[in-house]
Every structure is written in structure tokens, then in C-alpha cells.
Amino acid sequence: MFATIGAVLGFLGVTLGAFAAHGLKESLSAEMLVIFQTGVRYHLIHAVALFALGLGIDRLTPRLAHWAGWLFVSGIVVFSGTLYLLAVTGVRWLGAITPFGGTALLAGWVLLAISAFRQRR
């Protein structure tokens, strides 16, 4: 399941990156374009992590690995999503929500590390 979600999110991340590079570069300020591109970068990194998690989940501690995967998904939605919205709308208060997504991404990595440490043998 996480491999599929990661692949779909990877597709979406590439699409959004291309949209920013070609469709938004004329309408966004340089600062807002950098914010959007930061969202794309974290989105794609975690889409690849999800894909890899999906491929290797049978070698990890199942409960922790599943939590890590869902934290990555929610982190992409909240972290990258708020950056995308901030960049295109200019609504600054969205930046106050972004750290919750970043925290989810960090927690996902911590759980993934613990899961790998305790991996099934």
C-alpha cells in the first residue's frame, strides 16, 4: 500500500514541480516560488521514502513501520500542502501550520529508524 501511495505522491510532486517551474514562475514572487519549491522538495523526498517503505515493510517492525508511513503521508499533506497554499495565496497564517507537518515527517523518520533497528530477522 505505501509503495502505491508513494508512487502516486511522487507523480503528484513531479507535476507540482513542473507546474511551479513553468506555470507559476511568472506569477509568483521569487520568495514565494522558493517556498513552493521547498514544498516540492520535501514532498518528493518523502514520496520516495514511502515507496521504499512499501517495498521493505515486511522486513520491519509492522506497527512502527505503518505509523511511520502514515506520518509521512500526513506530513506531506500538511507540510508541503501549507507551503503550496502559502505560495499561491500569500496567506501568511498558513505558515503557522507548516511545523505540524514537519513534526509529522520527523516523527516518521524516528519511527522508521526504531522499526529498522528492531527489524524482523
Image (spheres, rainbow, N blue to C red):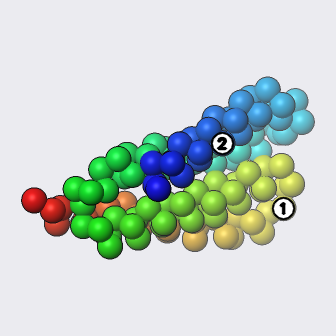
At horizontal 58% and vertical 71% (from top left) the residue drawn is 100
Q: Few, some or many C-alpha atoms within 10 Å of disc 1 (few <14, some 14-19, many ≥20)?
A: few
Secondary element under disc 1, as helix, strand or loop, is loop
Tell me if 62 is positioned left or right of 38 in this view. Answer: left
Disc ID at residue 12: 2
Does any portion of residue 93 appear in the rendered image?
Answer: yes
Under mark 2, the amino acid is Leu
At horizontal 16% and vertical 66% (from top left) the residue drawn is 118
Q: Position of residue 19 (x, y in %)?
A: 77, 34
**Mark 1 and mark 2 residues within 8 Å of each other at the beta carbon:** no
Disc ID at residue 60: none
Q: Provide the residue designation for mark 1.
A: 91
Does any portion of residue 110 appear in the rendered image?
Answer: no
| Residue 86, quarter of picture | bottom right
Tell me if 113 is positioned left or right of 119 in this view. Answer: right
76 vs 62, nearest the viewer: 62
At horizontal 37% and vertical 60% (from top left) the residue drawn is 109
Task: Give the Cα distance between marks 1 and 2.
Answer: 23 Å
